[in-house]
């Protein structure tokens, strides 16, 4: 296999991770305005480039793991794992469950 063909194969393998990372990071910026909580202070949100880089690294790892485990690329199970892993990565970067836990803690404290 020539270097050119290897490059093309790697680009085609990692393209879903790159597109998913970009889509999730940009859409969280857009839709985050609508779902922001007024009760809980927002955590420090990483810069967009950092979010895309972390999401891409997670997605690329999942795609490579799917290739190793399943023996070939482009299996639907791998894409399901890619979607769940990148979404979880983005959720964690934006504060994870801290907002929900803070609401529960405030509810518990106000009732006692």
Image (spheres, rainbow, N blue to C red):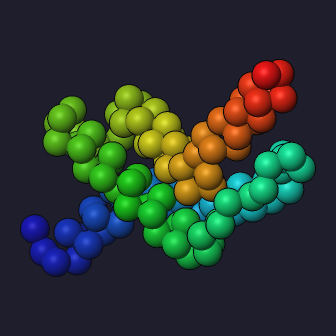
Give 14 or 1, whichever is nearer the viewer.
14
Quarter of the figure with residue 68: top left
Where is residue 91 drawn, in percent x and y? 59, 47
Question: How many marks are shown on the rendered structure?
Answer: 0
- Residue in the picture at 63% in, 44% down: 98
In the visual, does 14 lie left or right of 101? left
Q: Quadrant of the N terminus?
A: bottom left
- Looking at the picture, does residue 3 appear above or below residue 71? below
- Looking at the picture, does residue 77 appear above or below residue 8? above
- Residue in the picture at 79% in, 49% down: 40
Where is residue 96 drawn, in percent x and y? 58, 45
Q: Residue furthest top?
A: 111
Where is residue 25 drawn, in percent x and y? 63, 60
Where is residue 71 drawn, in percent x and y? 17, 36
Residue 1 in view (yes/no): yes
In the visual, does 64 lie left or right of 104? left
Q: Quadrant of the C terminus?
A: top right
Residue 91 in view (yes/no): no
Give 17 or 92, whichever is nearer the viewer.
92
Q: Residue furthest front?
A: 112
- Residue in the picture at 86% in, 46% down: 39
Give 91 or 43, whichever is nearer the viewer.
43
- Residue in the picture at 65% in, 66% down: 45
Q: Residue furthest left?
A: 1
In the visual, does 65 lie left or right of 78? left
Give 16 or 48, whichever is nearer the viewer.
48
């Amino acid at each position: 296999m020539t270097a050119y063909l290897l490059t093309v194969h790697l680009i085609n393998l990692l393209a879903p991770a790159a597109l998913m990372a970009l889509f999730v990071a940009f859409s969280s910026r857009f839709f985050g305005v609508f779902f922001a909580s007024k009760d809980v202070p927002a955590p420090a949100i990483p810069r967009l480039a950092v979010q895309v880089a972390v999401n891409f690294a997670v997605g690329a790892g999942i795609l490579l793991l799917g290739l190793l485990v399943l023996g070939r690329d482009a299996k639907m199970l791998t894409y399901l794992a890619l979607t769940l892993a990148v979404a979880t990565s983005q959720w964690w970067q934006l504060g994870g469950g801290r907002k929900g836990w803070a609401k529960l803690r405030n509810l518990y404290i106000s009732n006692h």
